[in-house]
Amino acid sequence: MCRVHRHKQQSRACGAFRIRDSRARTPRSSWEAHSTALIRRRRHGFRGRSGEDFEVLDNDEEEEEGRDEDLSGLPPLEDVPRNDGRETAASQPPAPEDAEETPEWVDVLGSGLLKKKVIVAGQGPETRPVKSQDVTVRLKTMLQDGTVVEENPSLTFTLGDCDVIQALDLCIQLMEMGETALIISDAKYCFGRQGRSPDIPPDSSLELEVELLSAQDAPDLELLSGKEKIELANRKRERGNFHYQRADYVLAINSYDIALKIIGSSSKVDFTQEEEEALVDVKMKCLNNLAASQLKLDHYDAALRSCNQVLEQQPDNIKALFRKGKVLAQQGEYREAIPILKAALKLEPSNKTIHTELSKLAKKHADQKCVETEMYRKMLGNPSGPTAKCKDKSSRSIPWKWLFGATAVALGGVALSVVIAARN
Protein backbone atom coordinates (compact mmCIF):
# COMPACT_ATOMS: atom_id res chain seq x y z
CA MET A 1 0.00 0.00 0.00
CA CYS A 2 1.43 3.33 -1.04
CA ARG A 3 2.11 6.06 1.41
CA VAL A 4 -0.46 8.43 -0.04
CA HIS A 5 -3.22 5.82 0.04
CA ARG A 6 -2.31 4.94 3.65
CA HIS A 7 -2.53 8.63 4.59
CA LYS A 8 -5.96 8.84 2.98
CA GLN A 9 -7.29 5.90 5.00
CA GLN A 10 -5.90 7.35 8.19
CA SER A 11 -7.42 10.70 7.35
CA ARG A 12 -10.84 9.17 6.82
CA ALA A 13 -10.65 7.30 10.14
CA CYS A 14 -9.45 10.37 12.00
CA GLY A 15 -12.15 12.52 10.41
CA ALA A 16 -14.88 10.09 11.45
CA PHE A 17 -13.47 9.99 14.97
CA ARG A 18 -13.34 13.76 15.19
CA ILE A 19 -16.93 14.03 13.96
CA ARG A 20 -18.24 11.60 16.54
CA ASP A 21 -16.16 13.18 19.28
CA SER A 22 -17.43 16.63 18.42
CA ARG A 23 -20.99 15.33 18.50
CA ALA A 24 -20.47 14.11 22.07
CA ARG A 25 -18.96 17.33 23.35
CA THR A 26 -20.78 20.04 21.41
CA PRO A 27 -24.25 21.19 22.51
CA ARG A 28 -27.02 20.60 20.01
CA SER A 29 -27.52 24.29 19.44
CA SER A 30 -23.97 24.62 17.94
CA TRP A 31 -23.61 21.31 16.06
CA GLU A 32 -24.38 22.78 12.69
CA ALA A 33 -21.70 25.49 12.98
CA HIS A 34 -19.23 22.97 14.31
CA SER A 35 -19.84 20.63 11.34
CA THR A 36 -19.11 23.44 8.88
CA ALA A 37 -15.85 24.27 10.62
CA LEU A 38 -14.86 20.62 10.68
CA ILE A 39 -15.34 20.26 6.88
CA ARG A 40 -13.10 23.26 6.32
CA ARG A 41 -10.40 21.75 8.51
CA ARG A 42 -10.61 18.44 6.68
CA ARG A 43 -10.16 20.14 3.29
CA HIS A 44 -7.03 21.98 4.35
CA GLY A 45 -5.57 19.19 6.45
CA PHE A 46 -4.67 19.10 10.12
CA ARG A 47 -1.91 17.81 12.33
CA GLY A 48 -2.38 14.59 14.33
CA ARG A 49 -1.27 13.92 17.87
CA SER A 50 2.01 12.36 16.73
CA GLY A 51 2.94 15.54 14.87
CA GLU A 52 2.60 13.86 11.39
CA ASP A 53 0.79 15.84 8.68
CA PHE A 54 -2.30 14.05 7.34
CA GLU A 55 -3.74 14.80 3.94
CA VAL A 56 -7.55 14.91 3.99
CA LEU A 57 -9.39 13.82 0.85
CA ASP A 58 -12.04 15.92 -0.85
CA ASN A 59 -15.61 14.70 -1.06
CA ASP A 60 -15.12 13.33 -4.54
CA GLU A 61 -12.15 11.22 -3.51
CA GLU A 62 -14.03 9.95 -0.44
CA GLU A 63 -16.88 8.74 -2.64
CA GLU A 64 -14.45 7.04 -4.96
CA GLU A 65 -12.14 5.35 -2.47
CA GLY A 66 -14.28 5.10 0.63
CA ARG A 67 -17.53 3.58 -0.61
CA ASP A 68 -17.31 0.86 2.07
CA GLU A 69 -17.43 3.53 4.78
CA ASP A 70 -20.49 5.46 3.59
CA LEU A 71 -21.88 7.59 6.42
CA SER A 72 -25.02 8.64 4.59
CA GLY A 73 -27.14 6.40 6.77
CA LEU A 74 -26.25 8.25 9.96
CA PRO A 75 -28.84 10.62 11.36
CA PRO A 76 -28.30 14.39 11.04
CA LEU A 77 -26.09 15.98 13.59
CA GLU A 78 -29.02 17.72 15.24
CA ASP A 79 -30.70 14.39 16.00
CA VAL A 80 -27.74 12.57 17.50
CA PRO A 81 -28.41 12.03 21.22
CA ARG A 82 -25.80 12.98 23.82
CA ASN A 83 -23.90 9.95 25.09
CA ASP A 84 -23.19 11.28 28.60
CA GLY A 85 -26.74 10.73 29.81
CA ARG A 86 -27.23 14.39 30.87
CA GLU A 87 -29.63 17.00 29.55
CA THR A 88 -28.33 20.39 28.61
CA ALA A 89 -29.37 23.49 30.45
CA ALA A 90 -31.26 24.68 27.38
CA SER A 91 -33.39 21.50 27.30
CA GLN A 92 -34.58 21.90 30.89
CA PRO A 93 -37.73 23.98 31.49
CA PRO A 94 -36.97 27.20 33.39
CA ALA A 95 -38.02 27.21 37.05
CA PRO A 96 -40.74 29.74 37.84
CA GLU A 97 -39.34 32.73 39.68
CA ASP A 98 -42.29 33.00 42.06
CA ALA A 99 -42.24 29.34 43.15
CA GLU A 100 -42.71 28.98 46.91
CA GLU A 101 -40.86 26.42 49.00
CA THR A 102 -42.97 23.78 50.69
CA PRO A 103 -43.08 24.52 54.44
CA GLU A 104 -41.40 21.88 56.55
CA TRP A 105 -42.23 20.57 60.02
CA VAL A 106 -39.72 21.28 62.77
CA ASP A 107 -39.35 18.58 65.43
CA VAL A 108 -39.04 20.86 68.45
CA LEU A 109 -37.90 18.28 71.01
CA GLY A 110 -36.50 15.62 68.68
CA SER A 111 -39.05 13.05 69.84
CA GLY A 112 -41.79 13.65 67.29
CA LEU A 113 -44.24 14.59 70.06
CA LEU A 114 -44.11 18.34 69.42
CA LYS A 115 -43.87 19.74 65.86
CA LYS A 116 -44.14 23.23 64.39
CA LYS A 117 -44.66 24.46 60.84
CA VAL A 118 -44.54 28.04 59.58
CA ILE A 119 -47.68 29.14 57.73
CA VAL A 120 -46.89 32.85 57.40
CA ALA A 121 -43.24 33.92 57.72
CA GLY A 122 -42.27 36.45 60.36
CA GLN A 123 -39.97 39.46 60.45
CA GLY A 124 -36.69 37.62 61.07
CA PRO A 125 -34.94 35.57 63.77
CA GLU A 126 -33.84 38.71 65.61
CA THR A 127 -37.51 39.42 66.48
CA ARG A 128 -38.02 36.18 68.41
CA PRO A 129 -39.16 36.67 72.02
CA VAL A 130 -37.10 35.51 74.99
CA LYS A 131 -37.99 34.07 78.37
CA SER A 132 -39.52 36.37 80.99
CA GLN A 133 -41.02 38.63 78.32
CA ASP A 134 -44.77 39.24 78.19
CA VAL A 135 -46.05 37.99 74.83
CA THR A 136 -49.44 38.38 73.19
CA VAL A 137 -50.69 35.81 70.67
CA ARG A 138 -53.77 34.95 68.70
CA LEU A 139 -54.62 31.34 69.53
CA LYS A 140 -56.92 28.77 67.96
CA THR A 141 -56.99 25.33 69.59
CA MET A 142 -58.39 22.29 67.78
CA LEU A 143 -58.76 18.57 68.35
CA GLN A 144 -57.32 16.17 65.80
CA ASP A 145 -60.69 15.87 64.08
CA GLY A 146 -60.75 19.64 63.51
CA THR A 147 -63.15 20.52 66.32
CA VAL A 148 -62.35 24.01 67.62
CA VAL A 149 -62.24 24.01 71.43
CA GLU A 150 -60.80 27.47 72.05
CA GLU A 151 -60.32 30.74 70.20
CA ASN A 152 -58.58 33.67 71.83
CA PRO A 153 -57.79 36.74 69.71
CA SER A 154 -55.44 38.21 72.35
CA LEU A 155 -53.85 35.92 74.93
CA THR A 156 -51.09 37.50 77.05
CA PHE A 157 -48.72 35.55 79.30
CA THR A 158 -45.13 35.54 80.56
CA LEU A 159 -42.92 33.35 78.41
CA GLY A 160 -41.24 30.51 80.34
CA ASP A 161 -43.33 30.85 83.53
CA CYS A 162 -45.59 27.84 82.75
CA ASP A 163 -48.61 30.15 82.58
CA VAL A 164 -49.92 28.19 79.56
CA ILE A 165 -49.59 24.63 78.28
CA GLN A 166 -46.02 23.51 77.63
CA ALA A 167 -46.55 23.11 73.88
CA LEU A 168 -47.32 26.81 73.55
CA ASP A 169 -44.63 27.90 76.01
CA LEU A 170 -41.92 25.98 74.12
CA CYS A 171 -42.89 26.83 70.53
CA ILE A 172 -43.44 30.57 70.99
CA GLN A 173 -39.71 30.90 71.69
CA LEU A 174 -39.05 29.68 68.12
CA MET A 175 -41.48 32.09 66.44
CA GLU A 176 -40.73 35.43 64.81
CA MET A 177 -42.78 38.58 65.24
CA GLY A 178 -45.79 38.49 62.92
CA GLU A 179 -45.33 34.78 62.21
CA THR A 180 -48.28 32.42 62.04
CA ALA A 181 -47.49 28.79 62.81
CA LEU A 182 -49.28 25.48 63.13
CA ILE A 183 -48.30 23.36 66.15
CA ILE A 184 -49.14 19.68 66.60
CA SER A 185 -48.59 18.43 70.14
CA ASP A 186 -48.95 15.16 71.98
CA ALA A 187 -51.23 15.17 75.04
CA LYS A 188 -48.13 15.09 77.25
CA TYR A 189 -47.45 18.75 76.47
CA CYS A 190 -51.10 19.83 76.56
CA PHE A 191 -53.65 18.60 79.09
CA GLY A 192 -52.29 15.09 79.61
CA ARG A 193 -54.21 12.09 80.86
CA GLN A 194 -56.88 14.15 82.56
CA GLY A 195 -57.81 16.35 79.63
CA ARG A 196 -59.84 19.46 80.27
CA SER A 197 -63.48 19.07 81.09
CA PRO A 198 -65.77 19.36 79.25
CA ASP A 199 -64.23 20.09 75.84
CA ILE A 200 -60.86 18.24 75.74
CA PRO A 201 -60.98 14.44 76.36
CA PRO A 202 -58.17 12.67 78.23
CA ASP A 203 -54.98 11.87 76.28
CA SER A 204 -55.92 14.21 73.43
CA SER A 205 -53.35 15.52 71.00
CA LEU A 206 -54.04 19.08 69.91
CA GLU A 207 -53.44 21.34 66.93
CA LEU A 208 -52.67 24.97 67.71
CA GLU A 209 -52.80 27.80 65.21
CA VAL A 210 -50.77 30.66 66.69
CA GLU A 211 -49.89 34.15 65.53
CA LEU A 212 -47.29 36.10 67.49
CA LEU A 213 -48.64 39.64 67.87
CA SER A 214 -46.26 41.34 70.31
CA ALA A 215 -43.51 40.81 72.88
CA GLN A 216 -42.25 43.23 75.49
CA ASP A 217 -40.24 43.15 78.69
CA ALA A 218 -42.16 42.33 81.86
CA PRO A 219 -42.89 45.25 84.19
CA ASP A 220 -40.27 46.21 86.76
CA LEU A 221 -41.29 44.60 90.06
CA GLU A 222 -39.84 47.48 92.03
CA LEU A 223 -42.27 49.89 90.37
CA LEU A 224 -45.42 47.81 90.87
CA SER A 225 -48.06 49.17 93.20
CA GLY A 226 -49.24 47.06 96.12
CA LYS A 227 -52.40 46.08 94.25
CA GLU A 228 -50.50 45.11 91.09
CA LYS A 229 -48.00 43.03 93.02
CA ILE A 230 -50.79 41.19 94.88
CA GLU A 231 -52.65 40.45 91.64
CA LEU A 232 -49.50 39.19 89.87
CA ALA A 233 -48.48 36.95 92.79
CA ASN A 234 -52.02 35.55 93.04
CA ARG A 235 -52.04 34.69 89.32
CA LYS A 236 -48.84 32.69 89.71
CA ARG A 237 -50.18 30.99 92.85
CA GLU A 238 -53.41 30.02 91.09
CA ARG A 239 -51.43 28.59 88.21
CA GLY A 240 -49.47 26.55 90.74
CA ASN A 241 -52.76 25.27 92.17
CA PHE A 242 -53.79 24.26 88.65
CA HIS A 243 -50.60 22.21 88.23
CA TYR A 244 -50.96 20.69 91.71
CA GLN A 245 -54.50 19.50 90.99
CA ARG A 246 -53.21 17.79 87.86
CA ALA A 247 -50.39 16.14 89.85
CA ASP A 248 -47.74 18.17 87.97
CA TYR A 249 -45.87 18.87 91.19
CA VAL A 250 -42.66 20.08 89.56
CA LEU A 251 -44.55 22.72 87.57
CA ALA A 252 -46.52 23.61 90.69
CA ILE A 253 -43.30 24.22 92.63
CA ASN A 254 -42.05 26.42 89.78
CA SER A 255 -45.18 28.59 89.89
CA TYR A 256 -45.11 28.92 93.69
CA ASP A 257 -41.43 29.89 93.60
CA ILE A 258 -42.15 32.63 91.05
CA ALA A 259 -44.99 33.98 93.22
CA LEU A 260 -42.70 34.06 96.26
CA LYS A 261 -40.03 35.93 94.32
CA ILE A 262 -42.59 38.53 93.30
CA ILE A 263 -43.71 38.99 96.91
CA GLY A 264 -40.17 39.15 98.24
CA SER A 265 -38.88 41.61 95.65
CA SER A 266 -37.89 45.07 96.81
CA SER A 267 -40.17 47.97 96.07
CA LYS A 268 -39.79 51.68 95.47
CA VAL A 269 -43.49 52.23 96.10
CA ASP A 270 -45.07 52.62 99.53
CA PHE A 271 -47.77 50.08 100.43
CA THR A 272 -50.71 50.53 102.73
CA GLN A 273 -51.13 48.41 105.85
CA GLU A 274 -53.90 46.44 104.17
CA GLU A 275 -51.68 45.73 101.16
CA GLU A 276 -48.84 44.58 103.42
CA GLU A 277 -51.16 42.18 105.21
CA ALA A 278 -52.56 40.91 101.92
CA LEU A 279 -49.03 40.20 100.64
CA VAL A 280 -48.22 38.27 103.83
CA ASP A 281 -51.40 36.23 103.40
CA VAL A 282 -50.50 35.34 99.80
CA LYS A 283 -47.00 34.41 100.93
CA MET A 284 -48.31 32.04 103.62
CA LYS A 285 -50.59 30.35 101.09
CA CYS A 286 -47.74 29.91 98.62
CA LEU A 287 -45.42 28.45 101.28
CA ASN A 288 -48.08 26.02 102.49
CA ASN A 289 -48.83 24.87 98.95
CA LEU A 290 -45.13 24.68 98.21
CA ALA A 291 -44.63 22.39 101.21
CA ALA A 292 -47.49 20.17 100.02
CA SER A 293 -45.89 19.84 96.55
CA GLN A 294 -42.47 19.13 98.03
CA LEU A 295 -44.00 16.49 100.30
CA LYS A 296 -45.55 14.77 97.25
CA LEU A 297 -42.07 14.52 95.71
CA ASP A 298 -40.51 13.24 98.98
CA HIS A 299 -38.42 16.39 99.33
CA TYR A 300 -38.74 16.27 103.11
CA ASP A 301 -36.03 18.74 104.08
CA ALA A 302 -37.32 21.37 101.67
CA ALA A 303 -40.91 20.82 102.84
CA LEU A 304 -39.82 21.18 106.47
CA ARG A 305 -38.13 24.51 105.68
CA SER A 306 -41.28 25.78 103.96
CA CYS A 307 -43.43 24.84 106.98
CA ASN A 308 -41.04 26.48 109.41
CA GLN A 309 -41.14 29.73 107.42
CA VAL A 310 -44.91 29.82 107.85
CA LEU A 311 -44.79 28.98 111.57
CA GLU A 312 -42.23 31.73 112.20
CA GLN A 313 -44.85 34.31 111.27
CA GLN A 314 -48.02 32.38 112.10
CA PRO A 315 -47.35 29.83 114.89
CA ASP A 316 -50.99 28.74 114.89
CA ASN A 317 -51.25 28.08 111.16
CA ILE A 318 -53.09 24.75 111.08
CA LYS A 319 -51.97 23.74 107.58
CA ALA A 320 -48.33 24.38 108.41
CA LEU A 321 -48.59 22.39 111.67
CA PHE A 322 -50.30 19.50 109.94
CA ARG A 323 -47.80 19.33 107.09
CA LYS A 324 -44.84 19.64 109.43
CA GLY A 325 -46.23 16.72 111.46
CA LYS A 326 -46.55 14.67 108.27
CA VAL A 327 -43.00 15.49 107.19
CA LEU A 328 -41.60 14.41 110.57
CA ALA A 329 -43.68 11.23 110.47
CA GLN A 330 -42.31 10.41 107.00
CA GLN A 331 -38.82 10.81 108.42
CA GLY A 332 -39.65 8.42 111.28
CA GLU A 333 -39.61 11.16 113.94
CA TYR A 334 -42.88 10.01 115.58
CA ARG A 335 -41.99 11.40 118.97
CA GLU A 336 -41.71 14.93 117.54
CA ALA A 337 -44.58 14.62 115.08
CA ILE A 338 -47.28 13.59 117.60
CA PRO A 339 -47.26 16.77 119.76
CA ILE A 340 -47.31 18.95 116.59
CA LEU A 341 -50.37 17.12 115.27
CA LYS A 342 -52.02 17.37 118.69
CA ALA A 343 -51.48 21.14 118.61
CA ALA A 344 -53.13 21.32 115.20
CA LEU A 345 -56.04 19.21 116.42
CA LYS A 346 -56.47 21.47 119.45
CA LEU A 347 -56.89 24.46 117.11
CA GLU A 348 -59.45 22.62 114.99
CA PRO A 349 -60.94 19.66 116.92
CA SER A 350 -63.44 18.79 114.18
CA ASN A 351 -60.80 18.23 111.52
CA LYS A 352 -61.16 14.57 110.50
CA THR A 353 -57.97 14.57 108.45
CA ILE A 354 -55.88 15.49 111.49
CA HIS A 355 -57.73 12.90 113.60
CA THR A 356 -56.99 10.15 111.07
CA GLU A 357 -53.33 11.10 110.71
CA LEU A 358 -52.83 11.30 114.47
CA SER A 359 -54.39 7.85 115.01
CA LYS A 360 -52.13 6.26 112.37
CA LEU A 361 -49.13 8.00 113.85
CA ALA A 362 -49.91 6.85 117.42
CA LYS A 363 -50.10 3.23 116.22
CA LYS A 364 -46.80 3.52 114.35
CA HIS A 365 -45.20 5.03 117.42
CA ALA A 366 -46.44 2.16 119.63
CA ASP A 367 -45.07 -0.38 117.16
CA GLN A 368 -41.77 1.44 117.15
CA LYS A 369 -41.57 1.31 120.96
CA CYS A 370 -42.27 -2.43 120.95
CA VAL A 371 -39.42 -2.94 118.48
CA GLU A 372 -37.07 -0.91 120.66
CA THR A 373 -38.15 -2.82 123.79
CA GLU A 374 -37.54 -6.16 122.11
CA MET A 375 -34.15 -5.02 120.86
CA TYR A 376 -32.97 -4.02 124.35
CA ARG A 377 -34.34 -7.21 125.84
CA LYS A 378 -32.22 -9.22 123.43
CA MET A 379 -29.20 -7.13 124.35
CA LEU A 380 -29.67 -8.22 127.99
CA GLY A 381 -29.81 -11.89 127.01
CA ASN A 382 -33.50 -12.38 127.80
CA PRO A 383 -35.14 -13.10 124.44
CA SER A 384 -37.91 -15.22 126.04
CA GLY A 385 -39.55 -12.31 127.83
CA PRO A 386 -43.15 -11.20 127.11
CA THR A 387 -43.50 -9.82 123.58
CA ALA A 388 -47.23 -10.08 122.96
CA LYS A 389 -48.00 -6.62 124.32
CA CYS A 390 -45.88 -3.65 125.14
CA LYS A 391 -47.09 -1.43 127.94
CA ASP A 392 -47.52 2.19 126.92
CA LYS A 393 -45.36 3.95 129.47
CA SER A 394 -43.22 6.98 129.00
CA SER A 395 -41.67 7.01 125.57
CA ARG A 396 -38.25 7.48 127.15
CA SER A 397 -38.47 5.41 130.37
CA ILE A 398 -38.38 1.96 128.79
CA PRO A 399 -35.46 2.45 126.45
CA TRP A 400 -33.30 4.24 129.01
CA LYS A 401 -34.15 1.72 131.73
CA TRP A 402 -33.05 -1.20 129.63
CA LEU A 403 -30.04 0.69 128.38
CA PHE A 404 -28.91 1.44 131.95
CA GLY A 405 -29.32 -2.22 132.94
CA ALA A 406 -27.38 -3.41 129.91
CA THR A 407 -24.58 -0.98 130.69
CA ALA A 408 -24.41 -2.16 134.34
CA VAL A 409 -24.20 -5.80 133.30
CA ALA A 410 -21.46 -5.01 130.81
CA LEU A 411 -19.41 -3.13 133.41
CA GLY A 412 -19.85 -5.96 135.92
CA GLY A 413 -18.60 -8.45 133.39
CA VAL A 414 -15.51 -6.36 132.68
CA ALA A 415 -14.74 -6.01 136.40
CA LEU A 416 -15.11 -9.74 136.94
CA SER A 417 -12.75 -10.46 134.06
CA VAL A 418 -10.15 -8.14 135.56
CA VAL A 419 -10.36 -9.84 138.97
CA ILE A 420 -10.01 -13.30 137.49
CA ALA A 421 -7.05 -12.19 135.40
CA ALA A 422 -5.35 -10.69 138.53
CA ARG A 423 -5.71 -13.91 140.49
CA ASN A 424 -4.20 -15.94 137.71
Image (cartoon, rainbow, N blue to C red):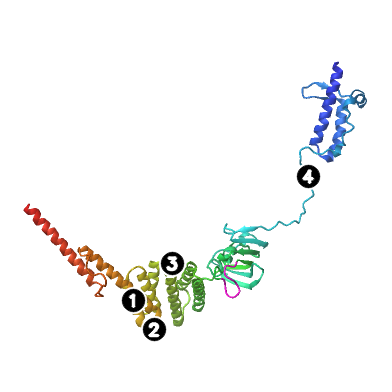
Q: Are circles 4 and 3 on residues that touch, CB within 8 Å? A: no
Mark 1 → mark 3, Cα distance in angstroms? 22 Å
Mark 2 → mark 4, Cα distance in angstroms? 91 Å
Which label number is shown at residue 297?
A: 3
Mark 1 → mark 2, Cα distance in angstroms? 16 Å
Q: Residues within 10 Å of mark 3 (few under 14, many from 20)?
A: few
- Say what amino acid the circle numbered 2 marks: Ser
Mark 3 → mark 2, Cα distance in angstroms? 29 Å
Which one is in front in this view, the residue at disc 3 or the one at disc 2?
A: 2
Displayed quadrant of residue 104:
bottom right
Under tag 2, what secondary structure? loop
Give the residue number, with chain letter if any, for mark 2: 350
Under tag 1, what secondary structure? helix
Residue drawn at point x = 44 percent, y = 76 percent? 285
- Percent across and percent down for residue 117 are 65, 61
Q: Are circles 3 and 2 on residues that touch, CB within 8 Å? A: no
